[in-house]
Amino acid sequence: MKYFFIGSSSFSKSALEKLISLDAEVLGAFSMQQMKNSDDYKDIEPLCKKNSIDFYLFDSEKPNALKDILKALKPDVVFCLGWPRLLKKDVLDIPRVGTVGFHPAKIPMNRGRHPIIWSIALGLKKAANTFFYIDEGADSGDIISQVEFTIEKDDYANDFYKKMTLIGLKQLEEIFKNFENNDIKRIKQNHEKATYWRKRSLQPDGIIDWRMPAENIRNLIRALSEPYSGAIFYYKDKPYVALRADVIREDRINLEPGKVLASSSEGIIVKCGNDSILLTSIKPKIQIEKDDYL
């Protein structure tokens, strides 16, 4: 089998390293320069050069470049893992076997954008890694491999990413061996059960609203922590990023959300819609007093 690789994320780099370690015949790799808000971007060009893999860079002024490259190389399988754009039918029709995509959610539910962030922000307790054949839809093709895993209550985005990657690389190894043995199985998705997550935005998705329950705010902080840009709040018109937090259970209801209940070297305690939250890691360092307001 001959393979081509497309990707631009940290997971992309790990996946390409795995394929190289398995002695896959990778004809070339296609990537892009870092875009705005692509927090988990990773440059795979050095890895390609180190392993003598032809590297191609996306150019918006050459929209047919990928199609022309694939037509010339004639791969059997394209791995498109960690790529922010949909592939068009004229590209998907080129590889003899098909194009394999990846989505860290249990599709057909939770197709769409930012699955790591939404999974944590919404407080889900389970997620899944899904490899599938890419079609013209969004995460709607036949499933090749799907493995569920647990999201622990103390998992932040990096913890999710590490779990996802570790499990995903094991799946990828099995998928590669199955391709080599012409033993790939396809599972049709039930499209009637499909749901979609939308693209997130800084306003309002990344801004802490102290009227929310403390648990929801902590989930947002967990979801937007590294490698992402963080959950933001403002104090005296200056933005701050909350990176770590714990919920403090309490039944006081006569305090306004956003009121600072304590400020010490351990962090600051802020009243929320329900309960309070202890912000233990804030960037940059904040100077604030008890009874002040955020």
Image (cartoon, rainbow, N blue to C red):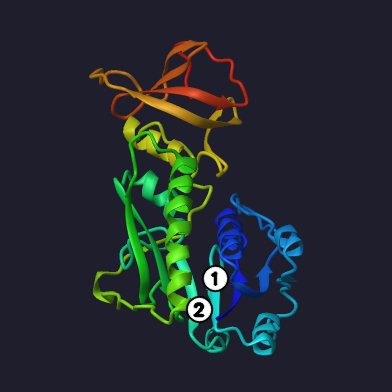
10 Å crowding of disc 2: few (<14), some (14-19), many (20+): many
Q: Is residue 293 left or right of residue 69?
A: left
Asked which quadrant contains residue 259, the reply is top left
Query: Percent x, y for residue 231?
Result: 50, 38
Q: In this view, does 100 lie to the left or right of 2?
A: left
How far separated are the C-alphas under marks 1 and 2? 7 Å
In the image, 288 versus 104, the foreground residue is 104
Query: Percent x, y for residue 195?
Result: 31, 65
For the N terminus, the quadrant is bottom right
Residue depicted at x 59% and y 57%: 9
- In the rendered structure, find residue 99 and report the number of the disc placed on it: 2
Say what amino acid the circle numbered 2 marks. Thr
Q: In this view, does 278 lie above or below 121?
A: above
Query: Percent x, y for residue 31?
Result: 67, 67
In the image, 48 versus 91, the foreground residue is 48
Q: Mark 1 points at which residue?
A: 80
Q: Is residue 31 above or below residue 61?
A: above
Element under disc 2? strand
Residue depicted at x 25% and y 21%: 253
Q: Is residue 125 left or right of residue 23?
A: left
Residue depicted at x 45% and y 41%: 159
Query: Percent x, y for residue 225?
Result: 51, 39
